[in-house]
Structures are given as structure tokens and as C-alpha cells.
Image: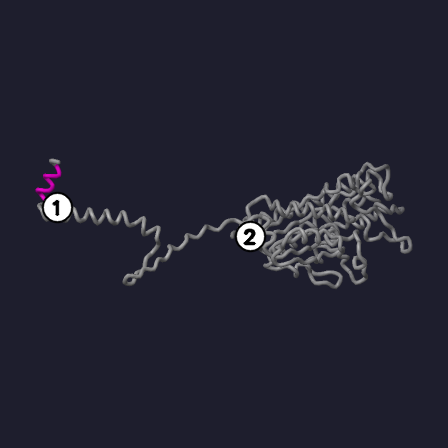
Amino acid sequence: MVRWGRVRERLGRRGTAVMAATAVIVLVAVIAIPFSLSDGARRCKGVNCVTRPWPAIPSPPRPITALEAATQGGYVALGDSYSSGEGAYAVAADRAVDNRCHRTSQAFYHLVAEAFRFARGTAFWACSGATTYSVLHGKSGEPPQTDQISRDTSLITLSIGGNDAGFSHVLAGCVVKLPFSRGCQGQGPEITQRFLALRVDLKTVLDKIVEKAPVARVIVMGYPRIFSEVSGTSLDNISIEDQQWLNGQARELNELIRQVAGDADRRIVTAKGKGSVEFADVYSAFAGHEIASGDPYVNGLDVDLLNLVAESRSFHPNASGYQHLAELIDAQIKAGPGRPILQFR
């Protein structure tokens, strides 16, 4: 009280009044601010007052999920016979002469297309016998498969490399053992050379796909092991030792595809790209269901005796096999690449 009296004496009556008025103004302002913030900005004309709410603060964009990234655009299935559905036929169109790419009604593409809702639809362009070259340049009178994708494509499935490695010829050499031929395992050096070329050619294919569909998730599928290695001493004239060797070559092919796909994805990450390249490992997909098992997921050797040639269905999945491959692809679509996808919503 003594201090306040001294202040009042120094300020005098007029100064004390000014100080009191200032305190009142500050108090009114403090009380009014919360009401102003809660009621919004007021624009008054005479006795009428219009209240407008404060603009909402926008939420920060969130990373989209792997499934959202895959389904926000279109799905396109590319690749060779393991994507076209070769070996599984249910309707006449599957075997029609004008079905030059042998795209069948049992291919895993149909099951994947039905499992998810793709905002921009789906397309089926895989072609039996396709190589990395034909994916880029066309085959059987059809345009390049890479021409069927665009910036609106959000999911691509691809199986490729088996024909580049010459596996159909290798299998033929294992089945038909002619005098003076290299037989089965004698083809190893040639396969090694083909693998070296495939490593370069597959990189070119993936780079082209990423260029044309920069936001797409590209799921590159490997190949399943088709021999059990234990079903007797011989299968389709292929010995247990040759079965083991063939499965080993398939494993090496899968590892090559895995490495090239991984390198392609790392390039996307380095460039801060929006898409991904993912490897779907299906090597053990047919475990317990190999050729000649009690419930096979893959066809054995089927020979056209009239022309003495192997039917195209030979050593390809049947309908059950493609259904199981579809389940693995579905799981990969949901799981994602195992890293953040640089797309936001």
C-alpha cells in the first residue's frame, strides 16, 4: 500500500486515471479474444451481424498404403507363358487358332483383377513364348507389351526370363537323349552365357517399364520349382539327378531376377521416384504339388504323337497352379515393397 501511494503521488490524479483506463482496456481484450476465436470473424452492418467461421486448417498429406498405390490406377499383366496362362484351358477360346499368345481364361491375371477394384480397369497383354526382346518390340503380330502401359498404370505384373534362358530347349535336351547330344546337364555352359545376357536385357526392360509407368508398382514374378526330385528314379525320361540340376538352374534364374529387380528398385529410391519394383518369390509355390505328385499344380510332358513334338502345355501350371500363383501375387500386392512408397494423399 505504501508503494502504491508513492506511485499515485508521482503520477498525480490524471496519470492514475490513465493507468486505470489502460488496465481496463487490456482486461477487456483478454476476455474478448476467446470469444472471437470461437465465434469466428464477425462482419457487422448496423444491428445485423454475420458470423463467418475461421477457415479450417488443412491436414498434412499422408503417405498412401501399398494397396492404395496398386489400385489407384490401372492393372496390366505383362510377360511370358507363366503369365498368359499356358497349360490351363477351360473354354474353346483358350485353344483358338487366332489366340496366338495363348492367353487363357485360367491365367492368374483374371483372379488378381477380380480380387481388387482398380480405378482405371485392367488389361491382359502377356504372351506365351515372350522374351525380354518381344516385351519391348512385340511378338506374334502384336505391339510391344510396354506400349500397353502409361502414367495411369498403378500395377504391373511380369514374368520374364525363362525363354531368354532357353529353358524349353533345355528341357527338350533333358527328355530326348540322342546320340552325340549334350544331354541335360551338358547344356550348363550355354545357360550361363544366356544368364549373362539376361541380366543386361532384364535391366533394360525394367528401366523402360519404370519410365513409361513411373508411379506403378511393378511385381516381377520368379518361376516355381516343378520337379520333386524324389518321385522315383525317372520322370518323363528325366533322371533324379537331372531333376535336381534343372531345379538348381531355376533357382539360379530366380536369384538373377531377384537381383535385377532389387537394383531397379534401388534406382527408384535414389531418384526419389514414386513407384517400385518388387520380386515375388514363387520358387517353392508348388512344393508337394510338383509334376507327377498326387495333386500336381503343373503339367508333365505331353507329346503330340502325330507330329512328335511336345504339347505347349508341357511343364506349365494347370488351373490349380495358376490359382496358387494368384494367391501369392495378391499377398504381395497387400504387403508392398517393404519400404515407404513416396506417394501421398
Q: Which residue is mark 1?
A: 16
| Front label number (1 vs 2) | 1
Of 42 and 205, the residue lying toward us = 42
Residue 136, given in percent of the width and then of the height, sits at 68, 58
Q: Amino acid at mark 1?
A: Thr
Instruction: Name the residue located 17 percent from the left edge and 49 percent from the top edge.
Output: 21
Where residue 187 sits in the image (x, y, percent)? Answer: 79, 45
**In-image side of 336 versus 238 (left or right):** left
- Disc 1 secondary structure class: helix
How packed mark 1 is, by other alpha carbons closer than 10 Å (few <14, some 14-19, many 20 or more), is: some
Would residue 220 appear left or right of 293 to someone viewing this image?
left
Position of residue 167 relative to residue 95, above or below, is above
Q: Residue furthest front?
A: 47
Name the colouring of the figure. Answer: one colour
Q: Is residue 8 magenta?
A: yes
Residues drawn in magenta: 3-10
The magenta stretch spans residue 238: no
Q: Toward the viewer: 28 or 324?
A: 28
* Nearest the eye: 262 or 37: 37
Q: Which mark is residue 4?
A: none
The extreme right residue here reads 306
Decide whether the magenta segment is chiefly helix, strand or loop: helix
Which quadrant, please, contains the N terminus?
Answer: top left
Q: Residue at x 80, y 48 (%)?
A: 315
The residue wearing badge 2 is 274
Q: Answer whether labels 1 and 2 touch (C-beta < 8 Å).
A: no
Q: Percent x, y for residue 15? A: 11, 47
Identity of the amino acid at label 2?
Answer: Lys
Number of numbered discs on residues: 2
Q: CA distance from mark 1 to mark 2?
A: 68 Å
Pointer 1 or 2: first along the chain? 1
